[in-house]
Image (cartoon, rainbow, N blue to C red):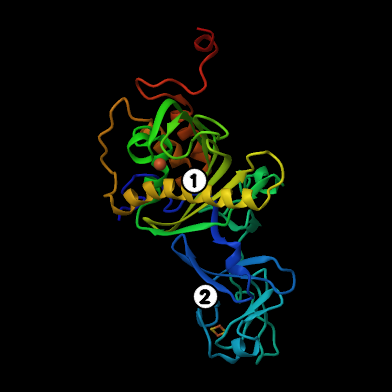
Amino acid sequence: MATTKDYRLGEFTYPRGWFMISDAEALNTHKPVAVRFFGQDFALYRGRESGKVILLDAYCPHMKTHLAARNTTSYVVLDGGGSNVEGDGIRCPYHGWRFGSDGKCDDIPYHDGAIPAAAAVKSWKVEERYGAIWVWFDPEGGEPDFPLPTFEDWDDENVVNGKWDYLGELNQHPQEVVDNIADYGHLSPIHGSTVERFENEFKGHNAIQRQCGGHRTLVGEGGASDMLHTDTWYHGPGILVSRVSGMFNSFMMIMHTPIEDGKVKVWHNLLVRTAHGGKPGIADEVAAHQFQEASLLAFAQDFEVWAQKAPCLNPLFIPSDGPFLKARIWYKQFYNPRAKAQDYLDQCEGKYIPKGMIAYTPEPEEAAA
Ligand code: FES
Ligand SMILES: [Fe+2]
């Protein structure tokens, strides 16, 4: 397992950005969930009062009890019907100190005096959207410098929304996952694509890949398109989405979030537009779920390789490969103080086409020729 240092990404161990930390379904009960990301432990729960999702640092400042670890024996948990979530707060199972959604201790059951200001845990900025929970992580502690993206398809009544597929933990540095955005050469051997046009573009917090061509499984007779077109982009370091038109017009979502330095959690989802363009019936839902399975299998083709490969620290790239080195420079902006982001962008922004390939969006003079 290689680390951020090994890839020489920058000053910070974990990148700045929005990250998925849970499927919202995990919070359908009022039990808190213990989660670990960015080398830290957290307590994640849904407030009983507001229904809002709350993420706190896990360890009680009193004597460092985990606020959300499995506990089936403390009377704090038993009296709460199997949960120590109280209102929008959470009560520590050990001595019963209660923390509000802002992370501040607001009750110590055996103490009448003032509650020390230090009796607090950090409360994180989280959002619930697209059936998932998202957190803004910033090693510098700043406010988001780009928003959590809006995916209109999620609210489109002519689109069938998938459930999140959890692919598990991957013992690879996220750099190996992000490399995929520039990986022209793997599309045929791994995914069965016969790529006709391919390009990458790096722009601000987005790394974009556009390509089209035939495909062994994702296009077929009577589909929305006889070629597979994918317009794929990273929105910051951990959110990858792709507008896919093949058998169906669909919107793919792949999320990865660092757990430790060199280890990530990965999720996949697919939103599928109905073939007739209207509201989905049962048959559309069945077709959409089948197409999501196919999309998951396509992603599993990458995942299988990643799970077993050695870290790519000294690659042997050729000019016909995609622009991996530019993609790696783009990725560095998130591992360094945001004041330095522009220095990295100056070295990578622009459009790149592998040697011998044709651009996806031809320049006006090429289009005219
Ligand atoms: S350790 Fe949490 S209340 Fe004592
Ligand atoms: Fe891939």
Name the amino acid, label 1: Pro
Q: Which mark is residue 237?
A: 1
Q: Residue at x 37, y 47 (%)?
A: 301
Q: What residue is pinned by disc 2? A: 59
Tell whether label 1 touches label 2 (CB within 8 Å). Answer: no
Name the N-terminal-most of marks 2 and 1. Answer: 2
Q: Position of residue 277 (x, y in %)?
A: 68, 39
The number of numbered discs placed on residues in the rendered structure image is 2
Nearer to the camera, 45 or 217 = 217
Question: Furthest-right residue in view?
Answer: 49
Q: Position of residue 167 (x, y in %)?
A: 44, 57
Residue 181: quadrant of the picture: top left
Does 160 sit left or right of 290 as displayed? Answer: right
Nearer to the camera, 80 or 350 = 80
Q: Residue at x 67, y 75 (%)?
A: 89
Nearer the viewer's eye, disc 2 or disc 1?
1
Q: Is 163 above or below relative to 57? A: above
* Residue 150 visible within the image: no
Nearer to the camera, 193 or 95 = 193
Q: Secondary structure at mark 1?
A: loop
Q: Position of residue 220 (x, y in %)?
A: 49, 35
Does 29 sit left or right of 181 as displayed? Answer: right
Q: CA distance from mark 2 to mark 1?
A: 28 Å
Q: Position of residue 272 (x, y in %)?
A: 60, 45
Nearer to the camera, 344 or 233 = 233
Q: Is 154 above or below relative to 94? A: above
